[in-house]
Amino acid sequence: MRRESVMAITDDVAASSGAAQKARRTWKHLPEEYPVEIAPFAMWPPKLFASIAYVAKTWLLPNGVRFQTLAVALIVWNWFTPSYDRVVTFQVDWMAEILLRNLVVFLAAAGGLHLWLYTFRMQGDATSFDARPMVKNNKAFLFNSQVWENMFWSLSIGVPVGTLYECVMHWAFANGHIVMIDWMDNPVWFAALFVLLPLATGTHFYILHRFEHIEPFFKWIHSIHHKNVNVGPWSGHSAHPLETAGIFSDIFLLVLVPCHPLHALYVLMAHYISGPAAHCGYEKIKILGITVLNSGDFFHHLHHRFYDCNYGTQELPFDPQFKSFHDGSPENDKLIAARRRELRSKATARSKS
């Protein structure tokens, strides 16, 4: 499926009703920090005190995704990871245990968010970026359903691939193929590595993602993920098997530096928890009016709607540097719309040639 075909899906879905057409032109909810900006340490020159505040905010707030992801990684490491005397050789039993554990974590994250936000509608549209529901009765999706297709790719490919990579990492740690450090060995580096990991994995994501937007790779691989114009919790890992294999491979960046299995588990749990949260379509998850999770990623939501912008993350300077940054403003909407018209024109010319 080519990029222009995915754009056509967007238009067909949006045109299904007057309300949906209006939602396509405007946002139901805008984030508190609007227009979107990149992180202060990714600006030039970097803003020192703002950067310190940003790091503290993203890591230390209990309702932050990173805080909760790290908490889950700690629980998983201490109580739900096989002992290292077992993982020195690949065996079905301990690998199956990890697969079951990862399925539970992912089902709790993606399934829990979907039930809360879309099945039971516990928040209605409060803090929802886009009021459109998940797509049903559309042949563009497997089983004619966006949610069922998303679940299929996530559970049949996403979790098994992530589990396989995790098992390889545990085996490598247990056999001394990775320099393993403990908290007491170097507490400064141990803590600093967690802060640096999003920059490393974000760079990995940007390079891979930018490559996937080049034809014919978009048609062959990335178009499956981009059928999700209005994303939901299951959308984060709804992707072609080759894309999934690439996305989860960021865990192998850790073989380059001294680290601990907890760092590897954090990277993996970020896929299973932060992935669904970032794609859930809501800025905040609230219970009884209290924000329990700062979830949605409006920066990436803009990418799903407009395709040709925001390829990376807000914590890296690549999109501003390469003129693909979209801050969510109407002025940037016009620029992206012009780019899409150009793409359609080129597609039409190719089809006639």
Image (cartoon, rainbow, N blue to C red):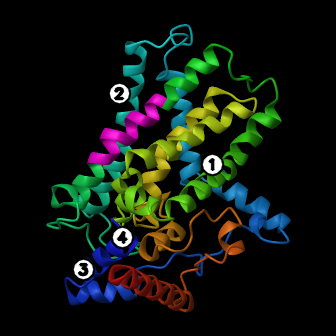
Sequence-first tag of 3 and 2:
3
For disc 4, the marked residue is 229
Horizontal and vertical percent for residue 320? 68, 74
The label nearer to you, 4 versus 3, is 3
Asked if the stretch drawn in magenta spans residue 157, the answer is yes
Which badge, 2 or 1, is on the more N-terminal residue? 2
161 inside magenta stretch: yes
Q: Please give the residue where the numbered disc 1 appears in the rendered image.
A: 201
Looking at marks 4 and 3 on the same chain, the residue that comes earlier in the sequence is marked by: 3
**Image height of 159 relative to 9, above or below:** above
Q: Is residue 60 visible?
A: no
Q: Secondary structure at mark 1?
A: helix
Instruction: Find residue 125 and report its image quarter.
Output: bottom left
- Residue at 45% of width from left, 84% of height from top? 340
Contact? badges 4 and 3 (CB < 8 Å): no
Magenta region, residue range: 152-164
What SS does tag 3 mark?
helix
Amino acid residing under circle 4: Val
Q: Kindly identify which residue carries mark 2.
A: 100
State the residue in front, 188 or 1: 1
Q: Amino acid at mark 2?
A: Leu
Nearest to N terminus: mark 4 or mark 1 = 1
Can residue 213 be seen in the rendering of this structure? Answer: yes
Q: Is residue 149 left or right of residue 289?
A: left
- The residue sitting at 55% across, 40% down in the picture is 249
